[in-house]
Image: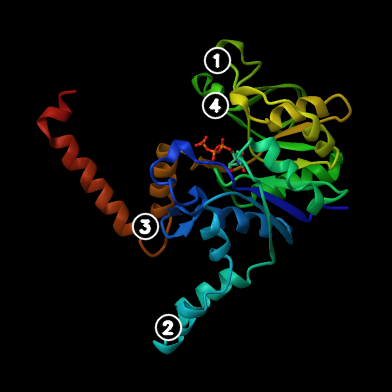
Amino acid sequence: MTISKGVFPVAGLGTRFLPATKAQPKEMLPIVDKPTIQYVVEEAMQSGINDFLFVTGKDKRALEDYFDHSGELERHLLEKGKTDLLALVRNISNMCQMHYVRQKQPLGLGHAVWCARQHVGNEYFAVLLGDDIVVSPKPCLKQMIEVYEQVKTPVLALRQVSRADVSSYGVIEGESLGNGLWRITDLVEKPDADEAPSDLAVIGRYILPPDIFPILEDLEPGVGGEIQLTDALKELLKTHTIVGYEFEGMRYDVGDPKGFLIATVEMALAREDIGEEFGKYLAELVRERDLQPDRSSK
Ligand code: UTP
């Protein structure tokens, strides 16, 4: 059986992005003109996911509204004859059937995944985090599902990060199987740089078995006082082989302002409609900046 259910935990507080996230979900912040969550939902759709469950929390209504019909807006666009825009907004609400479950308190990513247990039932499922956008010819999750179909075990997305950055991630210890595949032997959440078992970080795409739910149910809080998915995966290693996969593609960490800006600039430059003009503006801006005497002397 292949993977058809996608779980999207979107109940975090987004503290790295305050104050923007004080009263709106970080998943609704746009990269150019599209909310980050839509990039992730589109990746899931292109990977064959047809059942979408959002794990939401307080102040996340904007997300539900976004994927719903917007009667007033649609009427307005119809009356004004703006058929292109009308099609655009209708496509979003017609994209797919969304389901929602509420995480009553933001107790951690592991707890958010646990909230999906009834909806997921007894089958393998995918978890996609809105913090990570991956741009690649073949969608990242599709690459992972292809690996899953060969190995029939849990699959985690891996990316090499700098040693200085390992303390922001779950990091693996593993044995290389070639072709970007790793058999994971251990996992550590947010290790200190000098204690990290490798520089291979788990990023926000997972293919998980239902067996993760009873583990999450009994899990004690870990790093940061949160129920950590990494700790549950470590426990899962006792009964399952877990494979890590260094996927192909450009990954943007849009959960913090710097990564968000990088994604915005690169995706704007790649756009057919505005990329060229924006590129010229940027080049000019950089040239002028470099010509300033106080900058060029640094
Ligand atoms: P993060 O730790 O990156 O998200 O969790 P956060 O807590 O929202 O952000 P910061 O660190 O405070 O800036 C990774 C993913 O897990 C979800 C988040 O929404 C994000 O997609 N999450 C996290 C939950 O759904 N519930 C939680 O309790 C915690």
Residues 106 and 179: in front is 106
The span from disc 3 to disc 2 (Cα, nearest Å) is 30 Å
The span from disc 4 to disc 1 (Cα, nearest Å) is 10 Å
Disc 1 residue crowd, few under 14, some 14–19, many 20+, Cα 10 Å: some
Q: Which residue is mark 4?
A: 168
Q: In the rendered structure, which disc, 4 or 2, sits on the residue that comes first in sequence?
A: 2
Q: How many marks?
A: 4
Q: Which residue is mark 1?
A: 193
Ligand 1 quarter of the rendering = top right
Please say if the residues under marks 3 and 1 sit with CB atoms less than 8 Å apart.
Answer: no
Instruction: Find residue 76 and report its horizontal and vertical position in percent.
Output: 42, 83
- Label 1 residue SS: helix
Instruction: Find residue 31 and report its horizontal and vertical position in percent.
Output: 44, 53
Residue type (three-letter) at the residue carrying disc 2:
His
Q: Which residue is mark 3?
A: 275
Residue type (three-letter) at the residue carrying disc 1:
Ala
Q: In the rendered structure, which disc, 1 or 2, sits on the residue that comes first in sequence?
A: 2
Residue type (three-letter) at the residue carrying disc 3:
Gly
In the picture as drawn, the residue positioned furthest to the top comes out as 194
Residue type (three-letter) at the residue carrying disc 4:
Ser
Disc 2 residue crowd, few under 14, some 14–19, many 20+, Cα 10 Å: few
- Residue ID at (70%, 45%): 127
Residues 9 and 198: in front is 9
Q: Which residue is mark 2?
A: 76
Disc 3 residue crowd, few under 14, some 14–19, many 20+, Cα 10 Å: some
